[in-house]
Each structure stands twice: as structure tokens, then as C-alpha cells.
Image: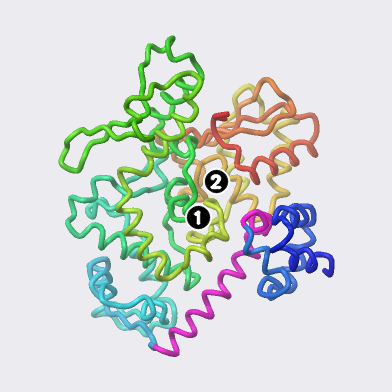
């Protein structure tokens, strides 16, 4: 402990990377220490939550415990000042009534302890009614009638609807949804609400990447892939650093991706930069005001520096909880391509899966399907881009020592032909930690 404290205290003068590499080397030991004594993150080990590279080495359960403790302190202070947040809502109008009753409340009042009653129903809220209220709201948020969110191509996740402006109060509603999700996190309530990977990144203020586009617009993603894989003259494309967008009033307009972009030609030399910029634009521009309104509400209850403890996969687990994954059901609903169920690689794979802890199994589900959501009817009803799409494991030809790759639109895992169970476990865990999903864009 002394050595680490010395490095931590020296953090201001020594490069933060020195501490980060120390933390990465001793990751397992440090996480075990924190698990036994969570208060260390408030004291001698506080640099582990302050420095981004160190945060990455903290296990999800340790981050979550620290996070919940910090929010609990805020909630207790708010309860002392403002008392409880009492609401009576009609079950049939839960979205509108909750919206109206929270609209005039301050952020401090929103932190108070919730007491919910459903009008016309008996019942004292000892926690059960609050859970029910969150559950009803989680369904209503995605109700197509409000036009707030639309499903992504994978059929299981949602993101803001660029056409939400059809509802005149849409930005007030996005702020309300941001507050509700922030409050659920602050209260430790789980929501059956699963968003696209890019939207989680927007919540965290992380730049979206090309791979995030696959779940939203697989056809466009495929076209960008073509641009990167083939010479532009062979594709017959003449592109510039600009994007065509349609305004809310249906007018087409050209936006530059860089200053003067419409006069800068895309070449085989600069096309990687073009693809990075155009995909960011595609995932952000149309929903910029919706994201900002959502974050206005969300940040009232959960500060940006506190939520930045997590990465985009952990944020889904924080909002929706760790799923219960029935491995026997998953194995029974898996198809193989160039592998047989009796092949040693497949036996090693399922042995590895059985050895994973709760969090690692959730990471696997996110890695292959794009979300930690388990279908209510079980894995025989796993959704993909083309409707029901079971988990399918393909033999990855080529490098036998490479990492497994995933294609979330098709619930597909490309598994190299490993030579032992140890290698299978090591490579799979490495892929889950690094998240090397989909197509590698260089």
C-alpha cells in the first residue's frame, strides 16, 4: 500500500501514466483490496477514480459501489432539506402525469425519496409501488406514439428519433426522460431500457466510432466498409468532406465535415478520416438537440464527472442491471458454421463460458448481440437485423492466435481455431475487455 500511496501522492508532479501502468499491473490485487475496504477510493486510492486510465482498471462492482455511495450522500442531504417527493399518478396516463408533476420540481427536490400512489388504487408505497412506477415508465418512454425513441436495426435497442419534433414538447420530454433515468440510477432502481451503443457514448461524452454505426444503419455501414476496402476510382465515387442532411422541414442541405470541406476531395490517403467524420456526423447531427435536452435532465441528478467512471457497456449494466443468463438455453439455441458442436474448439468455448462470472457473461452478451438484454422468451427468440437470429458461431479462418470478433447485427461470433482451452479463455476474455467487435477499421 505504501508504494502505491507514494506514487498517488506524486501524481501531480510525475506523469499520470506512471500510476496508470502500476494500476494496470496490479489490477487484480487492487480490486480485491477495494472490495474489502471500499472507503479506500475516497482516501489513499482516490486517484484511481480521478484518472481516466486508472478508472479502466477498476472492476464494475467496485465502481458501482463507489458511485452509489457518492449519490447516497447527495440524496440524504436533499431529503433533509426537501423531504420526500410525493406523486399521485393515473396508471393509464403515467407518462403525462409524471411529466406534469416533475416539470416544476428543482433538481434538489428530484433527489428526494420517492413516494408513489396510483390514483384510485389502495396501497402504501413501501418501495413496491415506486418499482412499479419505474417499470410502467420504462415501457412508455419507448411508446411509438410519443415519437421520442426509435428501435435500431437489431430490434432490441433504442435511440432518439430524429423526427421527434413532430411532438411540440419533445425537448421537454427528452429532459424528463433524462431526469427519470438519472433518478433511477441514483435510487438504484433497474430499468428495462436498452439504448444503442452510440447513445450510451453520447451520455458519457465519449466520441462515437465507425463500428457503432452498424447497429443503427447496417446498409450505410456496409457502404463505408466498401469505401475503406477498395480504391475509390474502382468504386467510381467522387466524395468531398461534406454531408447531405435533411432539415426538419424536409429541405436538403450540405454541411461541411471540416472547414471548407465541400471543396476538399476524399482520396485513398485521407478516406479513413472521412469515414470517421461522416459516421460521427451520421450518429450525432440529426439528434443533437434531443441528446442535449436528455443530458440537461440527466446531469441534474448524476454529474458528468461521476458517470464518467463507467464505459458505455458498464452504463447499460448500471441502468438495466446484470442479466440472468441461462447458458444451457443459450447453448441449445446456437448454430455453427464450419464447426460442429462436438469439435474441441466448441467444447472449450462452452467450458470457458461456464467459468465466467456474472459480469463477464453480461459482457459476452453485449459483445455478440450489442446489448445485455435477454429475450423474455429465452434465446430461441434472440432478435437480429432480420428478425429472429440465433447466436451463430463461425470458424474464423486465417490467424489461429487472433481475438474472436463479433458482428452484433447478426448475433455472430467469429471464433479462431484455438489449440487449447486455456488459449480459448485467454483470448475470449481479452476480446471482452477490449471490445474488439465488428469490422476492424484500421
Magenta span of residues: 52-81
Residue located 40% across and 35% down the image: 387
Name the quarter where the N terminus is drawn. Answer: bottom right
Q: Which residue is mark 1?
A: 316
Secondary structure beneath disc 2? helix
Q: How is the image coloured?
A: rainbow
Q: Residue at x 68, y 20 (%)?
A: 398
Vertical relation: 149 (above or below) 76: above
Quadrant in which the C terminus is drawn? top right
Front-most of 38 and 141? 38
Q: Horizontal and vertical percent for residue 178?
A: 37, 62
Q: Residue at x 47, y 53 (%)?
A: 205
Locate residue 335 relative to residue 176 in the image: left or right.
right
Query: Spatial distance from mark 2 to mark 1, Cα to Cα?
Result: 9 Å
10 Å crowding of disc 2: few (<14), some (14-19), many (20+): many
Q: Residues within 10 Å of mark 1 (few under 14, many from 20)?
A: many
* Residue marked by disc 2: 366
Q: Is residue 78 magenta?
A: yes
In the image, is 414 to the left or to the right of 119? right
- Mark 2 touching mark 1, by CB under 8 A? yes
Residue 19: where, in percent of width, then height?
Answer: 74, 58
Give the image location of residue 111, x and y in percent.
41, 78
Amino acid at each position: 500500500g505504501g508504494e502505491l500511496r507514494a506514487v498517488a501522492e506524486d501524481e501531480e508532479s510525475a506523469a499520470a501514466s506512471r500510476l496508470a501502468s502500476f494500476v494496470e499491473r496490479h489490477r487484480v490485487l487492487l480490486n480485491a483490496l477495494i472490495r474489502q475496504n471500499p472507503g479506500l477510493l475516497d482516501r489513499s486510492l482516490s486517484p484511481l477514480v480521478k484518472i481516466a486510465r486508472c478508472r479502466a482498471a477498476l472492476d464494475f462492482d467496485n465502481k458501482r459501489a463507489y458511485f452509489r455511495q457518492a449519490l447516497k450522500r447527495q440524496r440524504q442531504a436533499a431529503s433533509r432539506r426537501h423531504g420526500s417527493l410525493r406523486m399521485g399518478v393515473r396508471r393509464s396516463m403515467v407518462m403525462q402525469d409524471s411529466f406534469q408533476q416533475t416539470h416544476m420540481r428543482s433538481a434538489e427536490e428530484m433527489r428526494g425519496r420517492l413516494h408513489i400512489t396510483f390514483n384510485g388504487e389502495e396501497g402504501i408505497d413501501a418501495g413496491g409501488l415506486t418499482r412499479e412506477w419505474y417499470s410502467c415508465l420504462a415501457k412508455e418512454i419507448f411508446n411509438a406514439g410519443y415519437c421520442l425513441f426509435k428501435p435500431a436495426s437489431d430490434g432490441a435497442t433504442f435511440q432518439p428519433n430524429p423526427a421527434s419534433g413532430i411532438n411540440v414538447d419533445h425537448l421537454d420530454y427528452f429532459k424528463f426522460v433524462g431526469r427519470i433515468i438519472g433518478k433511477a440510477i441514483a435510487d438504484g432502481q433497474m430499468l428495462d431500457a436498452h439504448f444503442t451503443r452510440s447513445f450510451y457514448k453520447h451520455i458519457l461524452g465519449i466520441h462515437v466510432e465507425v463500428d457503432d454505426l452498424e447497429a443503427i444503419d447496417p446498409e450505410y455501414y456496409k457502404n463505408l466498409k466498401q469505401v475503406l476496402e477498395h480504391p475509390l476510382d474502382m468504386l467510381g465515387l467522387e466524395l468531398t468532406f461534406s454531408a447531405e442532411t435533411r432539415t426538419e422541414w424536409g429541405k436538403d442541405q450540405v454541411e461541411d465535415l471540416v472547414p471548407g470541406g465541400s471543396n476538399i476531395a476524399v482520396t485513398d490517403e485521407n478516406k479513413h478520416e472521412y469515414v470517421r467524420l461522416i459516421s460521427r456526423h451520421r450518429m450525432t447531427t440529426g439528434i443533437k438537440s434531443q441528446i442535449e435536452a436528455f443530458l440537461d435532465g440527466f446531469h441534474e441528478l448524476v454529474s458528468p464527472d461521476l458517470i464518467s467512471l463507467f464505459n458505455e457497456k458498464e452504463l447499460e449494466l448500471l441502468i438495466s442491471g446484470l442479466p440472468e443468463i441461462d447458458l444451457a438455453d443459450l447453448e441449445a439455441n446456437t448454430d455453427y458454421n464450419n464447426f460442429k458442436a462436438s469439435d474441441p474448439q466448441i467444447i472449450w468455448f462452452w467450458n470457458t463460458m461456464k467459468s465466467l462470472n456474472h459480469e463477464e457473461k453480461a459482457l459476452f452478451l453485449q459483445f455478440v448481440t450489442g446489448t445485455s438484454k435477454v429475450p423474455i422468451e429465452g434465446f430461441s427468440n434472440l432478435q437480429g437485423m432480420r428478425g429472429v437470429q440465433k447466436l451463430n458461431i463461425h470458424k474464423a479462418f486465417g490467424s489461429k492466435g487472433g481475438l474472436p470478433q463479433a458482428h452484433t447485427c447478426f448475433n455472430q461470433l467469429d471464433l479462431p481455431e484455438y489449440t487449447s482451452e486455456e488459449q480459448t479463455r485467454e483470448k475470449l476474455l481479452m476480446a471482452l475487455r477490449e471490445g474488439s467487435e465488428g469490422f476492424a477499421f484500421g
